[in-house]
Image (spheres, helix red, strand yellow):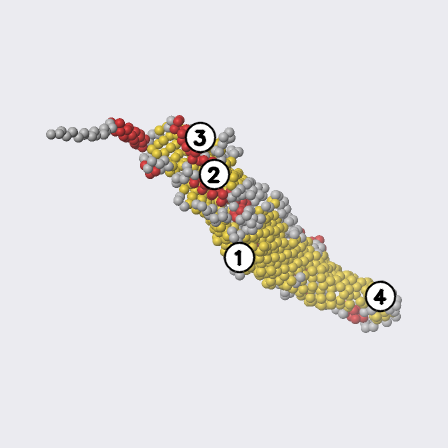
Amino acid sequence: MTETPPVPVQAKPRRAPRRGRSGLWLLLSLVFMAFALVFGVMGLTGKPLRLPVWTVVELESRVNRALGPGMGGAALSMGAIEVTVGRDWVPRFRLEDLRLARPGAEALLTLPEVRVAIDAGALLSGQVRARSLTLVGARLKLRRDADGRIDLGSGGNLSFAHLDSFAAVLDAAEEVVALPVFSHLRRIEAEALTLTLEDQRARRVWEVGDGRLTILNRDTELAAELGLSLVGGGQAPAQALLTFVTAKGSAAARITATVDRVAAADIAAQAGVLEWLGVLDAPISGRLSTTLDAGGRLTGFDGALTVAAGALRPRAETAPIAFEQAGMTFGFDPAAGRIILSDLTVQSRSLRLAATGHAYLPDAVRGNPDAWLGQMRLTQVMVDPDGLFVEPLRFSEGAVDVRLKLDPFSLDIGQVALVEAGRHLIGKGRVSADPEGWRLSLDLGLDAIRHDRLLALWPMALVPRTRAWLVENLTEGELFDVQAAIRLSPGAEPRLSLGYEFKEVDVRVLKTLPPVQKASGYSTIEGNAYTMVVEQGQVIPPLGGPIDVAGSVFSVPDITQLPAQAVIRLLTDSSVTAALSLLDEPPFRFMTKAGRSVEMGQGRAVLETVLRLPLAKKVMSADVDFRVTGTLHDLTSDALVPGRVLTAAAMTLTADPAALRIAGPGRLGKVPFDVTYDQSLGPEAQGRAQVAGTVTLSQAAAADFGLGLPDGTISGEGPAAIAIDLQRGTQGKLLLTSDLAGIGLRLPDLGWSKSPTQTGRLELEATLALPPPSTG
């Protein structure tokens, strides 16, 4: 039998030793366990781990490769790195002394400390991504030139970004967060930030410390929040919080600023719309919001601001005008160049104002506007400066048109109209701040007002003595067509021009005289002179009926004189008794001094009385100078010459503190005359008076005087001089003399006669039968 050869058995492949592979996994496990142990210990203890130098160098190299050429050749260097693990098991890196610099040049940016938080989710998948970045102690310098271009630097003389507009700033921020090293960052913060803001357009530099910046990198938008604190001058800290939100890929943005006690000048420097706030020396709090379109152009601006106690002070050398509080809510329409004031208030001890309106700001979007043209509706106006008016001035509604310029400061009031209780006050004017001080030009017109309301409008310190005279002597009535102008100039006394008409007013021209009743006329103040003209009115003296005083004038030639001197020109038309009754009132006392009654006769008296006296609290008779001139018409008197009736068509009357004189032609009984009656008024006169002049001698005159001459004794007629001495309480003495020219005499019993062509000498002395009536 044939042996079958055995089938060879195939050898199985030899397995590799499992010891080597299991050793690798053991090593990796040990490393992982060691890392987890270290990670866990760091997380539990919070103790940092300082990385070796070679690790720092390697990380610098990786970061600079990631930055690439986008940083213009700048490289990043770090002094040291510490790693910590927080209780949230998120690893964080702390980088010390981080510097960004170009080769061979000064550092562009120096950061004492940078903290980086790692994305834990990415770390589990084997990727190292930064989740947040915190910068500590950064110093930045932001410069805006006169054309609005922005230059960003590190605080020294070097800069690393030149941007033409705010839109370019937003684009640059998007480019930075789009870099690979920053692309996964969700939050970037800066603490203890120091900013230097230099605005060449506003010619201002701000140093800001303790700044806080937060940038949020969202999926579709980029948001930033910047908090600033300003401390200086011993004042309370000023704070500002700025918020920026922009959509990625577009320059459209929303900017919101919340300010607390920030100086008005600092806010005014940031936007042409608010530049007018620069004339205020006061802190401001409130909110401002701005929107930009995709092209970076301003599309909206609104805000609500509260101005704390401060002052209007457009120049350092001008005196400030204080206020207690002001506020406004506004919106700005860039397309129309118009700012809408939905609420404007001013409150102080001197002024309370509430208004709404709008203002046009030409070129406000392109730069600082040259002027503000505003129209406002006033809903409340109350003016009450301390000691200026008797009571606050109130107006319930009104309107005003203004134009404001800042360089140099001037406020032009095209028209202001104020209404209260049916009264309309219209005005225009200009206020400017010169290097020497404030300058004011104001013109006002009022349709009608009661006299007491006008005096309430009249500042108490403005020409006070004339005002005091009006308070005391303008007693009641209606004033209308009131026109006033006020001029204030640096280094000069205030000037007031005032004019008004009045009707149905009672005016007292002198405290001792009866008032002018139902007076109508006008009054003016021009320069230093005050004048009041009475066109219609009457005075009621104690006796004789009313006196017409139309045309009378009260004036103060110089209202600045101390005391001011008044000139009163009284034009009177009345009965003789009324005129003499008025002239017997203080300070005249004509008839009392003469010891005679004011009822001396009948007739009309048309007189002009001019008085000069000081406007002082107490006026003595010796302080008053006066002169009376005029005419007595159709005079009939049986008191001037006792026992005789005096008649005259017209006689002149003059009087002054020394004497009263009545002169002119007339008839004494039936005797024609042309005489002067002189009544001395001084204390030394003791009631003496004299009648002197000429009379016409005739047979009728002899019979009238009761000389007892037979009929036919006198023929013809001729002049004779007459003098009558009168003294209170005694009989009068009469002396008559004549040369007998024109007079014929015949004494039949003596056989003597004289023809009218011959002259002679006649002297007659007589004692009047009755003494003059006396008032004593």
Labels 1 and 2: the sequence-earlier one: 2
Tell me residue 742's x, y (percent).
Answer: 85, 68
How far across and how far down the image is residue 552, in percent? 66, 60
Residue under label 1, please give it: 398
Q: Mark 2 is on which residue type?
A: Leu
Cβ atoms under marks 4 and 3 closer than 8 Å: no
Q: Mark 4 and mark 2: span between their CA atoms?
A: 114 Å
Q: Which mark is residue 774?
A: none
In primary-sequence order, the first of circles 3 and 1 is 3
Where residue 221 sits in the image (x, y, percent)?
42, 45
Residue that protrudes farthest toward the front in the picture: 1
Q: CA distance from mark 1 to mark 2?
A: 40 Å
* Alpha carbons under labels 3 and 1: distance apart: 68 Å
Which of the 4 quarters of the picture holds residue 13? top left
Q: Nearer the viewer, mark 4 or mark 2?
A: 2
Q: Is residue 298 shown left or right of residue 762?
A: left
